[in-house]
Amino acid sequence: MVHKQQAGEVVAQARVRAGLTWAQIAERLGKPEVWTTAALLGQHPMSPSDAAAAAELLDLGADVVEALQRQPYRGSGEAVVADPTIYRFHEALQVYGPALKELIHEKFGDGIMSAINFRMQVERVPDPEGDRVVVTWDGKFLDYRW
């Protein structure tokens, strides 16, 4: 049995061997780029048809296809990730998280941004001082109801 994280490692290696970008895989699967990347790395379950399509595209075995369809333990891993890119998201949320919470409450009321009904996009924006990374988080507002 292959675990989801192991399947993600197999997929990442297969992607490089196939010479495909995550964007190309997502386009061929007809799914959003960020969701596809997260799913193939083990953070979302894939439908049988999506897992089979990914397997055909990346020449994955049946055990990996099965693992891609299982429910994940989301966000599992190190408590504070040492990888610099991921750590910077932790850092940004530590600095700006309380402000984001206040602004969401001020603009929407008592509630949260859903990470279940959620979209994300990553863009590269040219800038004379060095290209910028623009990450858009688009989550449905869920109000607390008493």
Image (tube, helix red, strand yellow):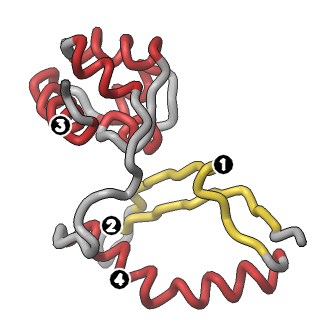
Residue 83, percent from left and from top? 18, 67
- Amino acid type of the residue that numbered disc 4 sits on in the rendered structure: Glu
**Front tag of 3 and 4:** 3
103 vs 68: above or below: below
Q: Position of residue 137 (x, y in %)?
A: 57, 60
Mark 3 residue type: Gln
- Disc on the earlier residue, 4 or 2: 4
Cα distance, mark 2 to mark 1? 30 Å
Quarter of the image where one finds residue 16: top left
Identified by mark 2, the residue type is Asp
Residue type pointed to by label 1: Asn
Q: Residues within 10 Å of mark 3 (few under 14, many from 20)?
A: some
* Residue at (40, 30) in percent of width and height: 70
**Tag 1 residue:** 117
> Disc 4 marks which residue?
91
Q: Residues within 10 Å of mark 4 (few under 14, many from 20)?
A: some
Q: Earlier in the sequence, mark 3 or mark 1?
A: 3
Q: Earlier in the sequence, mark 4 or mark 1?
A: 4
Question: Residue 82 placed where, x, y %?
Answer: 17, 72
Q: CA distance from mark 3 to mark 4?
A: 27 Å
Alpha carbons under labels 3 and 1: distance apart? 26 Å
Residue that badge 2 annotates: 131
Q: Identify the residue at horizontal 37%, vertical 11% (top origin).
A: 52
Left of 112 or right of it: where is 98?
left
Residue 40 in the image: x percent, y percent? 33, 34
Pointer 3 residue: 6
In the displayed structure image, the side of residue 2 where residue 114 appears, left or right: right
Element under label 4? helix
Depicted 104 relative to depicted 54: above or below: below
Discs 3, 4 touching: Cβ within 8 Å = no
Relative to 79, 23 lies left or right: right
Tell me the mark number nearer the camera, choosing from 4 and 2: 4
